[in-house]
Structure formats: structure tokens, C-alpha cells
Amino acid sequence: MKVLVVGGGGREHALVWKLAQSPRITRMWCAPGNAGIAAERLRSNDRPVECVAIGAEELQALAAFAEAHQPDLTVVGPDNPLGLGIVDLFEKHELRIWGPNKKAARFEASKAFSQSFMEKHGIPAPRSGIFSEPEEASRFAAELGGRCAVKADGLALGKGVLICRDMAQADEAIDRILRRGAFGEAGRRIVIQELLEGMEISLHALCDGRVTRLFPTSQDHKRAYDGDQGPNTGGMGTYSPAPFLSEAELADVARRILDPWQRGCEAEGIDFRGILYPGIMLTAEGPKVLEFNARFGDPETQVYLPRLENDLFELLSASAEGTLADHQLRWRPDACVCVVMASEGYPGSYPKGRPITGIEAAEEIPGVKVFHAGTKLADGQLVTNGGRVLGVTALAPSLEEARRNAYEAVSRIHFEGAHYRRDIGAKALAPTAD
Ligand code: AMP
Ligand code: GLY
């Protein structure tokens, strides 16, 4: 089987690494990939994974490549190509592809769509409203006492959510998005939600249009600095499982969120084949959905896939073909921790091209795998090439050990100006542990 993976970050490195273990895969490409992806080899025949210089949003070029090379499955990592309709385009060319089509990807591409869907189908969500008029938006924010999340409707590179704690902040956020057009077309409409308090966790469910298979819990760390301080980022680290829900509570979440979601999709003619990734707040009134994503999380994928025992190629094929009912997910009981090492200045502007050393020494620690996000080879030297540079990941029998090993691995890796959080996974351990 031949596989093409679309994307070039840490999530895609984890996808490629796991797919490469499938005995069925004999050739793999990744567009555009990165230096870590280019160093992976297939277990079946030791053939290297081939990186192809096509960007994840160059849909026509990707389709032309797939026409020429005929992969048996294309796996899409990032949200943008899904929102742009890569699945519909490939299907028009009769190329098999895994991921939600454009209509299904609206769960992520339009927060207003998701919000109305949740209300219509009884999915627990924060109190909210959808607005394109600043005055109406401001009146609703006032009803919430100014304590609200103001969200651009469309895709805004993960930056379209402004958290407000009083009316001055809410009015400024509304003004920025609706009047000053800070997010362009993506901010023509906004969703305003009441601000929820509680523990935030990530859920993932693999879907095939009829059946949903829920993953274990994980938790991301979105703020740049320790103690959830500083600006929002794409995610500074993750761990799985997150011990805030028992098995029974997780099953209850599935009943309260995934079941009505699936029934709603069927009622509205939405054929969702891919990963549904709800961001959940565990509130005093029970779990509520803050947002839906329509893809694997980054860096959630980096802690899920080392725990997954199944052949990922078989699961993704079943999701694309609608045969997920024949598969159960199997997970190692071990814990997994991923610490992101970022460039100096990230999530603001940052330099590129800084030499990276120590990855081999880090990977000598049992259970450690270093996933590359923003890296490239320049004249044979591995250098930084993005904001998030590496996802240093450790799998171990306990969360404490996984954490210890991940941080020991981080201490062996060097590039100038590297910054990372020192408290990944700390919330899950006793308050004295950190
Ligand atoms: P989103 O992209 O919608 O997940 O929002 C980004 C981040 O903003 C989330 O991960 C939460 O930390 C925070 N957030 C979003 N909506 C809310 C809300 N209604 N209440 C509290 N925090 C929120
Ligand atoms: N972990 C954050 C995201 O993938 O959106």
C-alpha cells in the first residue's frame, strides 16, 4: 500500500512515524514534511519516507501529485486543506483520502455553524450568541457581565479567540474583530460565549459517518509559560491520559456529546469521516464543549499515537470506508508526555536557522521519541525552521516516569534560545509534585 500524508508539523511526524510501522505500507510520501519525517523508514521494507516540496494548501498540486503516483490512501493532518475542500477535490479525481469533506469540516471552519449545531441537537455548550452587528454583540456581552470569550467565526490560525473579563475588554474585542477586521473575512461574524471555569481537556473520536470511537483523554497546555501564563500558542505540551475523568465519566461524556452529535450529523446529512476533536471544559454542571476541531490535535497526536496499539493505516482506512464498526481501539496502559521546545520569541516572531544538537542522545532514553515540527536540514546540519521546533515525547508506565524521562531528554537537546514549559503534566500530579 502507498500512502501520502499532507502536512509538515509535529502532528504529521507522529502520523508518519506510526503509519510507517504498518506492515502493509510499502511506500510513503509526505507533503511538505520536515527533517524528522525525511529520516523515518518503513518497517515493511526499510524504504525512507519521501518528502515532497508541495505545501499543505496547494490543493491542485497535491491532487496532480496523487494522480501521478496513485497512493492507496491520502491522510490529511492540518485544518486548512480540509476547510478548503481537499477531500471533495480528491474524491472528484477518484482518489481515496482520509479526513472530513468540506461540509463536515465546517465543525472547525465555522464556529457559528458549530454553535448552532450544538444548540439544535442538545449538546452541552456554554451560553452563547452569534453576531455580525457590534451593538447587538455588545448588548449580549453586557448580559454576561463582560465575562466572555469573543470568537471569530472562521479559521484564524488559532488566534481568533479573545478572552474577556469585563465590559471594556469585551467591547475592545468586538471592536477589533467586527469593526477593525482584525481577522479579515474569518471575523465577519463572531460567536460570544459565557466564560466557563474549570479544567480543560481534549477529546478525540475517530468517526466513519455512522460509528464513533472515543480515544482516552489528553490535556494540552496552550499558554506560552509555566502556570498557564503568557500568550496563547498552538500548544506547548500534552500528556495522556488526563486523570480528571473516570472510565465511567468518559463513557458518560460520549453519551452526552458524541451520541447527539452523531444523530445530528445524520439528521443534517453530514458524512463526517475523520477525527472529531472537541475541546471540553469540565464545569461544576458537567462537561461542556468549547469548540469542535475536525482533525487530530497538535501536540495531542504526539501523545496518542505512541499509546495506540492498532495499525493506524487500518483504522484510517476503516474510517474513510465506513467500516469502523469492525474495529475496536486498543491502548497501552502507559502514560505519554510531550514537551514542546519552541524558538526564542514564539508565539511572536522568532529567528530560524539555529543549529539543533542532542536528539540522538535524547532518544537513547527508553521510550523517548523526538517528533520534529519546525526543522530542516541546511547543508547537512539540522536547524530550526519554525515556532514550535520539537515535540520531545516519552512513554512510560507512569505519568511521573514519562514526565521525568521527557524532561531528561529535553535537557540533552540544545539550540540557541530554546524555550519550553517546565510544568507539562503537573496538574495531573499531586499539588506538591511540582
Ligand atoms: P477555542 O479555539 O475555541 O478552543 O478557544 C481557545 C482557548 O480559549 C480554549 O482552549 C480555552 O482555553 C479558551 N476558551 C474558549 N472558549 C472559552 C469559554 N467559553 N470559556 C472559557 N475559556 C474559553
Ligand atoms: N492542541 C491544539 C490544537 O491542535 O488545536
Image (tube, rainbow, N blue to C red):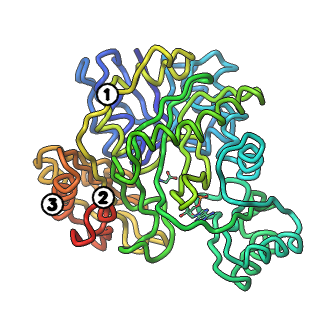
Within 10 Å of disc 1 (Cα), the crowding (few <14, some 14-19, many 20+) is many
Question: In the rendering, which numbered label is found on residue 325?
Answer: none
Establish whether ligand 2 lies closer than 8 Å to the Cβ of label 3: no
Amino acid type, label 3: Glu
- Quadrant containing the N terminus in the rendered view: top left
Mark with earlier residue (1, 3): 1
Give the image location of residue 277, x and y in percent. 53, 43
Placement of 271 over or under 107, stated as above or below: above
Q: How far apart in space, not on screen, are marks 2 and 1 (Cα)?
A: 23 Å
- Residue 126, compared with residue 172, is above or below; it is above
- Specify whether residue 417 is in view: yes
Work out whether residue 329 or residue 159 is closer to the camera in this orientation and state it: 329
Q: Distance between the residues labelled 1 and 3?
A: 27 Å
Label 1: element kind: loop
Amino acid type for the residue under numbered disc 1: Ala
Which residue is at 32% across, 70% downward? 419
Marks 2 and 3: CB-CB under 8 Å? Answer: no
**Left or right: residue 282 compared with residue 63:** left
Instruction: Determine if the C-beta at disc 2 is less than 8 A from ligand 2.
Output: no
Q: In which quarter of the image is the C terminus?
A: bottom left
Q: Earlier in the sequence, mark 2 or mark 3?
A: 2
Picture quadrant of residue 197: bottom right
In the figure, 134 relative to 296: above or below? below
Residue 411: x %, y % from top left: 17, 64
Q: Counting other residues with Cα less than 10 Å from the Cα at mark 2, is it few (<14), some (14-19), or many (20 or more)?
A: many
Which residue was labeled with disc 1?
Answer: 20
* Residue occupied by mark 2: 339
